Image (cartoon, rainbow, N blue to C red):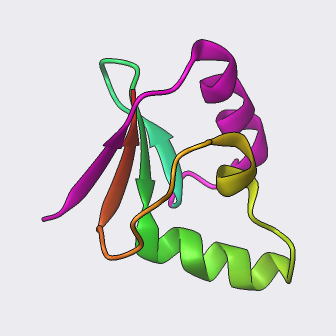
Amino acid sequence: MSIQEISVSNNQKKSLLKAVKDQQVLFQDDNGDLVVNVEAYEEWKELKGKGSDPIEEIVEEALDYDSEYFVFS
């Protein structure tokens, strides 16, 4: 399992939760970290259409789509 860990602010976490409401894509674990299933996120983005990149717009770090999960802490 490959994971990309990314540090974000509390405001960014709130923005991520508002932007992606599908719990199959993004969920909050017991310690408050946000976990994104990369494969589900890519499918979700395709359904939303072009120009829909909410995580990329909120997070200022490059995302590694070869990872299975993004963990925002």
Residue at screen point 75% across, 54% down: 54
x, y percentage for residue 34? 45, 35
Q: Tell me what residue is drawn at x 23 percent, y 55 percent.
A: 3
The picture places residue 41, in percent across and down from the top left corner, at 56, 68
Q: Is residue 34 left or right of residue 45?
A: left
Residue 36 point in image, percent of width and height: 45, 53
Residue ID at (51%, 26%):
8
Residue at the left extreme of this rendering: 1
Is residue 27 part of the magenta span, yes or no? no
Which residue range is magenta in the image? Answer: 1-24
Residue 65 placement: quadrant = bottom left
* In the depicted structure, whether residue 65 falls above or below residue 2: below
Residue that appears at 71% across and 41% down? 58
For this view, does 31 lie left or right of residue 47?
Answer: left
Whole-percent x, y for residue 28 in the image: 45, 33
Q: Give left or right: position of 26 versus 60.
A: left
- If the image is split into quadrants, where does the C terminus sit? top left
Q: Tell me the quarter of the picture where residue 37 sits.
A: bottom left
Residue 20 highlighted magenta (yes or no): yes
Viewer-side residue, 22 vs 46? 46
Q: Nearer the viewer, residue 7 or 13?
A: 7
Q: Quadrant of the N terminus?
A: bottom left
Q: How many marks?
A: 0
Vertical comparison of 12 with 10: above or below: below
